[in-house]
Amino acid sequence: MALDTEIYEGFKNAFHGRCFQLLVDAYQTSVTVKAVQLDWNENDISSELHECMKKNPLRVKWKISTNVEAHLPDDRAKIKGFSATFPRIDFRLTSFISEYEYDYFFEAKNLKVSDSALKRRYIDTGIDNFVSGKYSTGCIIGYILEGATADTVTGINSLLTKDHRDSESLTVKPHSLHTDYYESEHSTIGTLKHFMLNFTTT
């Protein structure tokens, strides 16, 4: 049983790394071709990145399927209209490796350095949806549409401090695929990953 768990965890970690690779590749492609406009909605940007992911030959090689606006079914009562009330998350990536099936999720939020409401939303419907267990097995993407990444993250951390949640502040960490990578620590879920994608340089 221990060996099975070790194998499962090994495959899972490899899959997560591939998901990060597809995300970062999609971001770099979109920046190179200047595809994303700074007035776009979150769903517009997610759609563009999803198209880049789909076209990436590594996705086919790794046998990863992707979709956007994925429903997250739960155990709520099944009465008429119940499916419309399921929570949704921006990206779902799925793969079968050996006899195991793996899912990974990305939740995306627009961010601007001068917009406190967007930073508050990043916390309330991004971070907190993972912390509460509404979302699982995934990370958050910040689409930065104005200002420097570090300044924007400082603004998020200031709001967390106001909420007496200093221990949950985002901290920059080294990542082999992406420079603007952060982590936060939470008592309920442990480490939450944050990929900040800054489109202002395009």
Image (tube, grey):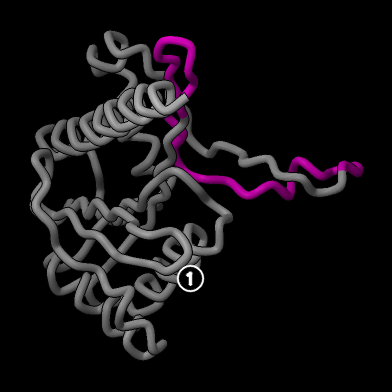
Give the residue furthest to the right.
Answer: 79
Q: Is residue 105 above or below residue 159?
A: above
Task: Specify start and end residues of the magenta stretch as a single range.
Answer: 78-102
**Residue 82 highlighted magenta (yes or no):** yes
Question: Where on the picture, by quarter, is residue 159?
Answer: bottom left
| Residue 62 position within the rendered picture, expressed as x and y whole percent measured from the top left | 30, 13
Secondary structure under tag 1 reads helix
The residue sitting at 24% across, 43% down in the picture is 36
Total marks shown come to: 1
Nearest the viewer among 130 and 124 is: 130
The residue sitting at 40% across, 52% down in the picture is 41
The residue sitting at 32% across, 26% down in the picture is 15
| Residue type at numbered disc 1 | Asp
| Residue 106 position within the rendered picture, expressed as x and y whole percent measured from the top left | 40, 44
Residue 83 appears anywhere in the view? yes
**Residue 163 highlighted magenta (yes or no):** no
| Residue 84 position within the rendered picture, expressed as x and y whole percent measured from the top left | 74, 44
Instruction: Classify residue 115 as left or right of residue 151.
Output: right
Q: Is residue 151 above or below residue 103?
A: below
Residue 202 appears anywhere in the view? no
The residue sitting at 55% across, 36% down in the picture is 70
Answer few, some or many: residues within 10 Å of disc 1's Cα (few below 14, many 20 plus, some between 14 and 19).
few
Nearest the viewer among 191 and 199 is: 191
Instruction: Classify residue 106 as left or right of residue 112.
Output: right
Q: Is residue 149 above or below residue 22?
A: below
Instruction: Classify residue 140 as left or right of residue 195.
Output: right
| Residue 118 position within the rendered picture, expressed as x and y whole percent measured from the top left | 38, 70
Question: Where on the picture, by quarter, is residue 200?
Answer: bottom left
Residue under numbered circle 1? 124
